[in-house]
Amino acid sequence: MRDYFTKLLRYTAWADRCILAALRELPAAQQEALPLFAHVLAAEHVWLSRVYGAEARLAVWPQLSLEECAALAGENAAGYEELLQGLGAEELVKPVRYRNTKGVEFVTPLDDILTHVVVHGGYHRGQVARAIGRAGGTTISTDYITFVREGL
């Protein structure tokens, strides 16, 4: 399972890089798309912080520049890679205790949190791709199957 989640989170990092590249090429899309993309990255950060029992330094809907997004995307990718290194099957299902943004406490297994990070990002990246298309850009595919087909 660790290898499976490693691949899914490599996909997440790849998809984040694809969005960054598309937004760099089409500044006209940034007004609509950048807040959504910043949210994706901030949520990745928030969940990683929760897993480590640390305080997140960002809100889930931050205002970030494209360069701040790029830095956060790299930080998140490295953080998830580090998290997964050396984890055994039993650690992937370990319960993680955290508080949501409203202060309500929850306990969720790590594998469910990692699944949520991947799925949540895909949802909002689709919104970003739509915004890019509305701004006149070529709609990009950040689908998992595209990642797999490219042999990444």
Image (cartoon, grey):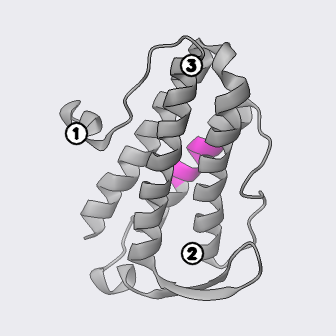
The residue tagged 3 is 134
In space, the residues marked 3 and 2 are separated at their CA atoms by 36 Å
Q: Please check the rendered image and state whether residue 73 is part of the magenta-colored stretch, yes or no.
A: yes
Q: Residue at x 40, y 53 (%)?
A: 9
Q: Do residues under tags 2 and 1 come within 8 Å of each other at their CB atoms?
A: no
| Front: mark 1 or 3 | 3
Residue 131 spot, x, y in % from top left: 57, 27
In space, the residues marked 1 and 3 are separated at their CA atoms by 27 Å
Q: Residues within 10 Å of mark 2 (few under 14, many from 20)?
A: some
Name the mark on residue 67.
none
Front-most of residues 138 and 16:
138
Q: Quadrant of the N terminus?
A: bottom left
> Looking at the picture, does residue 47 appear above or below residue 121?
below
Neighbour tally class for label 1: few under 14, some 14-19, many 20 plus, Cα within 10 Å: few
In depth, the one of 143 and 133 nearer the eye is 133
Dot label at residue 148: 1
Q: Is residue 95 visible?
A: yes
| Circle 2 or circle 1, nearest the eye | 1
* Three-letter amino acid code at the position of disc 1: Val
- 3 or 2: tag closer to the N-terminus: 2
Left/right of residue 12 with respect to residue 132 in the rendered view = left
For the point 77% across and 58% down, the residue is 59
Residue 6, above or below 37: below
Magenta stretch, main secondary structure class = helix
**Which residue is located at x 48 percent, y 88 percent?**
95
Amino acid carrying label 2: it is Val
Could you tell me if residue 71 is visible in this image?
Answer: no
The secondary element bearing badge 3 is classed as: helix
Q: Is residue 103 above or below residue 24?
A: below
Magenta stretch? 72-78
Q: Which residue is identified by label 2? A: 51
Q: Identify the secondary structure beneath mark 1.
A: helix
